[in-house]
Amino acid sequence: MPDCASPTDASPAELIKSYAATLTHKPHDLSSLIITLAEKISAPGENETIKQAIRLLRDRNFTTRAAALRRYIGLEQNGAEASPTERLRHVAEQLVAHAKTPDDLAITGFSAVFTAHPTFALANDVYDLLAQCAEDPAHPLPILPTHRRAAPPTLDEEQALALAAITRGRDALDVLAQNIFQAARQRWPEVKNLNPAPIKLASWVGFDTDGRNDIGWWDTIRIRLGLKIAQLERLLEGLKKIGLHDSPLGERVLAALMATVQQRDACPRSIPGKSLTPEEIVQFSHKLISLRETALLHAEDLLPLFQAERAKLDDATAQELDVIRAGFLNHGLGISHIHTRLNAAQIYNVARTRLGLTDDPTLPFHRRALLSHIDAAMDNLKPLAIDFGALLVEPSAASRLMMVMAQILKHIDSGSPIRFLIAETESGYTLLATLWLARLFGIRDEQIEISPLFETETALENGAEILEEAFRSPHWRAYLRVNGRLSLQFGYSDSGRYVGQLAAGPMVERLRLRTLELMKEHGLDDIALTMFDTHGESIGRGAHPFSLKERLDYFSPANTRQALKKAGITSRVETAFQGGDGYLPFGTAKLAASTIATLAEFVAAQHEPIDPIALKDPLFSKPDFAMDFFSTIALKMGDLVDDPGYTALLSAFGPSLVDKTGSRPSARQSDTARVTRITHPSQIRAIPNNAILQQLGWWANVLHGLGGAARRHSEQFEQLRHKSPRFRQLMDFAIQALKHSDLDVLRATIHQLDPGTWLNRATECDNADDRMHFLSIARDLEELEFWKSVPALFRRIQREDIALRSAWPETPRMEVEEKLLHVIRFALMERIWTLGTQIPYFGPRGGLTREAITTLILCLDVPRALRLLDDLFPISAPSIADLDFGEPGGAGEAQGFAREHREIFQPLQEAFDLLREVGIAIMHANHCFG
C-alpha cells in the first residue's frame, strides 16, 4: 500500500500540499500516489475534495496565465504598468520622425491576421475573465464550476469573437492614427491629406475553406457582407460623434449601410439537412446587384465627400474626421481585409478539368511541360463572364472560391485586394495555375495577392526552386509588376510537428534570404515583399513564448533585416492571432491598445539602424554548424514521426484528453463502438497534435532531437547559449517546453498502458472484485497492443532527454503542482477504467458488444460510450399504467436501469468531466492550447 499521508478530512489546499510533498520526495515514482488518489476518488464523500483541489490548481494556473499575458503584450514592463496611451503617443512620434516624406506614413509595415481553427478551448466568459484579469491583476476571480465550453463554437460564433477582437484593434489603431496626425502636423503643417497606415488588420475566419465542407460559398459572401456592414456602422458611428451624421457624407454612408443590410439579409445561410434552391440564389443575386451602387463599391468613392465636409470644420473636428477617414480608407469596405485559403491539390484539379493537364505537378520531369502549357493558356486567355448560376453548378472547390472572390470584387468591394493563400504549394506551377484561374474569372492582377504557403518540410526545402519556376514565367513577372507585391506565407504548424519547431525557424529564415536573392536575380527588387508568419499563440505553432516583442523579433532577425535593407526591398511583416488564445491580446480595450503599441514599436524599429553587434552574432558566422545542428534535429524528429510507437502514443487517448475546440468538422463518428486508430501522425491536424503532446506532458515537437544535436556539438552548444542572442532566442522555445515536460509523467503514461501494470495490481490485490477489475483492464489493454511499440518509443525519448540534460544541466523542469495535475488525471483514468469493467453484460446487438464499449472507455471516448449505454440501458421504461391494450394484463412492470445509471454511468460522466477539467488546468499552466 502507498505510504503517503492522505487525511480524509483534509482541505483541498492541504491535500495539494500533502501530495506535492510526496512528489518532491519521490519524484520518479508516481505509481503509489496515483493508486492513493484513485482510491480517494472512489471513496464515498471524497470526490468533492478532489474536485475542489482540481479547481484550486486550475485557478492558480489561470492567475499565472493572466499575469503572463499582461507581460506578454507589454502592459507590464519591469514590474510596473506601461501606459498604452503613452506608448502609442511615443511610437507615433517615432514613426513620424523616421518618415522621409508624408507619403512614407502610408506604407504598411505590419498586418495582424485574425484566424480561427480549433483553438477555442475555454468558455467565452472565461476568455473574457482571463483578459480582465490580465488588464487588472486585482480583478476578483470567481470560483467557477468549470472553465470548459458547453459545446464547440459554431462558425458564426468564431466570426463574432474575431469581429469583437478586430473592433478593439481598430479602436487602438484610431488612437495611434490620432497621435501620428498630431506629430505629423508639427513636422509638415502644410500637408492636409495624410493617410497613416503603419498597421492593418485582416481576417480569414469564414474565408479559409481548406479542409472544410461546412462553409458554403453563400456563407462566405454573407460573412463578407457582415464585415462591410461592421465597417459602415463604424464609420457612421464616428460621424455621429462629431455631428456629421446628417451631412451629405453621413447620409451617403447611411444609405450604403441600409442597402448592405438588405443584401446580407437576402443572402442564404447553410442549414444542416436543408439544400438551397436555385430560386433562393436568384432572389439574392438580384438584390445584391440591384443595390450594389447604393451600397458602395469602392471606399475612395467617399473621398470627395470627406474632403468637402472637412473644409467646413474647425481644426479640432477636422482632425477627428481625419482619423475616421484614415481608418476607413485603410481597410476599405470591410472592418478588416480578408484572406481566402485552400489547398494546392484543388487548383490542380481545376487545371486538369478545364485544360486537360493530367500530368502530376509534384513530379519534376512533368513540371517543365506543365509550366509551358499553363503559360500558353494565359497567352490566349479570354475571361469568362460569371454569375451566381455558375457558382451553383460548379463542382470544383477552387473554381467556386475564385468565383466567389470575383463576385465580391464585382459586387461588394472592388478596391480592396484579396489575399489568396495556397496550402501545400509544391511547385511554381501552383502559382501560375492560380493566376490563370483568377484571370479566367475576370479578376484583375491588382485585385488578388496570390500567396504560397511554405510549411511542410518539402516546401521549405524546395521553396526557392518553387519561386524560381514562377519567376521564369513572363506572366508571373507581369502579374507582380501590376500587383506591386510578392506575398509569401510561412507556416510552423506542420513544419513544427514534422521537423521540429527548433529546426523550422532556421529553415524559414534561409528561404527568406534566398527569396531576396531571387528577386534581385530576376529584376524584381523594386517589388514589395509581404512575409506572413502563421504563428499561433503557442510555441507548438512557432510563436515565441515569452513576449510579443520577442515574437516579432524572432521572425525578423538582424541578418534578415540587413539583407532587406541591402536589397532595397520594401517589406511588410504579418502574423496570425489565432482563435481563442490569439484574440486574448485584443480581449479588452486596454489590452488591444498595448498590443497595437507593441506592433507599432516593431514597425518603428525596422527603420532604426541595425545593431552591428547583432549582425556579428556567432550563429550567423557559423553557417556550417547551424546547418548541421538544426538538420540533426530535423532528422531525429523525422525518425520520431515515423516511429510506430509515436503514432500509438498520439492515438492512445488522442483528442479525448481535451474538448472539441473549433467548428472545423472532425472525422464523422457513427453510433457504433469502433475505436478509430490513426496509422501515422499526419492523420491528426497540427493543433490537436500539439495539444495531445502538451496534455501528455512531453512537448516532443519542440524538444525531440535537441539532445542529439547538443551532444553532437557539445562545445559549440555551450558557447552559443552564452554568446549568441539568436541562439538563445531559439533556446527560449526549449526552455518553455522543458518547463512543461516531464519524463516521469510520460513514463507514467506508458506504465498505465502496459497490461503488466494491471496484472501486477491484480497479483497484489486482496479484494476479489478489485482483482477482477484489474484483470479485465489488463486483458483489454492487451488487445489494444500499445505495449508492442510504446515502450521502445519511451526509450528513444529517454535517450534524447539524457543527452540534453547532460549537455545542458541547468535545464528547467516541470513544477510539482503541474505534475500533480497529471497524477490526478491518471487516478481519474483508473477510476474511469474500473467503472468500465462494471458495465453489465449484454448480448451482441447489431455488432455492438460489451467489449467494444469497454475499449471505447479505455481510449477515453467516454461521451460516445455513454450515448451507446443510454440506449442499451434506459434509465426508465415507458409508462403504461393508464393505457388500455384491449385485454387483461398486469404482468408487465416498468423496468429501468436506475441503479446502473446511479452507480456506474453517472460516476463515469463525473470522472470524465473532472479529467477534462484537469486538461483545462494543464492548458492554463502551459499558457496555450496546441
Image (cartoon, helix red, strand yellow):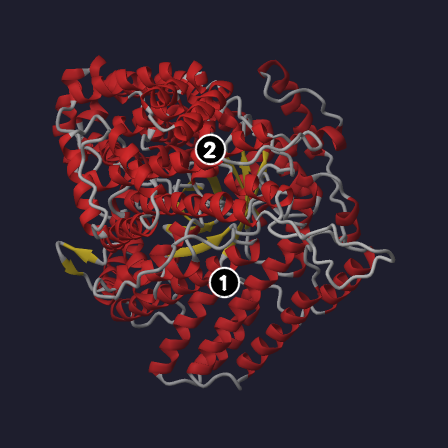
Q: Earlier in the sequence, mark 2 or mark 1?
A: 1
**Location of the C terminus (image quadrant):** top left
Camera-nearest residue between 567 and 762? 762
Q: Position of residue 142 (x, y in %)?
A: 30, 63
Q: Is residue 100 visible?
A: no
**Residue at 53% in and 44% down:** 900
Left/right of residue 821 with respect to residue 247 in the rendered view: left
Q: Position of residue 439 (x, y in %)?
A: 67, 42
Vertical order, 717 against 452 (above or below): above
Q: Secondary structure at mark 1?
A: loop
Image location (x, y in percent) of residue 9:
22, 51
Q: Nearer the viewer, residue 214 or 493?
A: 214
Q: Which residue appears farthest toward the right when viewing the image?
A: 886
Q: Is residue 418 visible?
A: yes
The picture places residue 580, in percent across and down from the top left corner, at 42, 52
Question: Residue 654, labelled with which disc?
Answer: 2
814 displayed left or right of 791: left
Q: Which residue is mark 1?
A: 335
Tell me which residue sits at (66%, 45%) in the image: 402
